[in-house]
Amino acid sequence: MKNIYIYILFLVSSFLVVSCDKEDIGGTATESMAGEWYVTAVAIDADGEVVYEDEDLYNLGSFHLDTYNTADNVSNEMWISDNGNFWDFKVKVDILDDEEMLFTVVDGQNVAYDSKVSILGVILPNQATTPSGMPADSISFFVEFDDDTNPATYGFDSYRVAGYRYTGLAGDE
């Protein structure tokens, strides 16, 4: 009788061990490019020279921006959104090369409100240094909005948005 209890205990414990195995969920197709970013925006001319710094432009300081996969979960497109922190845009961009991490869109439909957005950008792994001195991924892109009258009014061509992957550490904000 004692042996039966031992066998039952062994059988039950083996089921418990097997049932505790967790499935590997895996990542998304744009996992290396997806994230939350801490960025600033400046106005630039056609040569890429800064015409207006942030404090001269909108005085926003640093703001959060998100990049994330689409519902299709494919490696050749992703969403980029400023969550209303800069111009209020959310647009799907094409990933030109997921190895080089280049992305672009020309006259992409802004789903935050009815307008068109053009973006050309890159993500550079470990090329930024956070305020706390730690390495982080860098993001930089040029952006234009079809409903923006500021470039014509103030004499610049587009905006350059650049920054680093958000770390969540207080020293990096």
Image (cartoon, grey):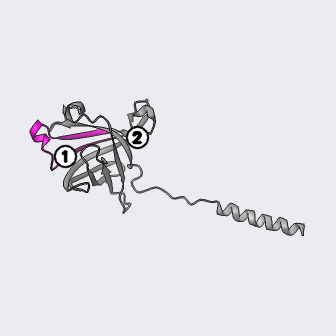
Measuring 40% from the left and 57% from the top, which residue is drawn there? 29
- Residue 20 in the image, given as x and y percentages of width and height: 64, 60
Q: Which of 100 and 153 is in front in this view?
A: 153
Tell me which label, 2 or 1, sits earlier in the chain.
1
Residue type (three-letter) at the residue carrying disc 1: Glu
Q: What residue did someone put label 1 on?
A: 144
- Residue 127 in the image, given as x and y percentages of width and height: 37, 36
Q: What stretch is highlighted in magenta?
A: 139-162
- Residue 35 in the image, given as x and y percentages of width and height: 39, 47
Q: Which disc number belongs to residue 50?
A: none
> How many marks overall?
2
User: What is the residue that sits farthest to the right in this orientation?
Assistant: 1
Real-space Cα distance between discs 2 and 1?
24 Å
Q: What residue did someone put label 2 on?
A: 166
Q: Is mark 2 on a helix, strand or loop?
A: loop
Is residue 142 rendered magenta in the image? yes
Tell me which corner region of the image, top left, top right, bottom left or bottom right, holds residue 137. Answer: top left
Image position of 68 with respect to 141: above or below: below
Which image quadrant: the C terminus?
A: top left
Left or right: 21 with respect to 29? right
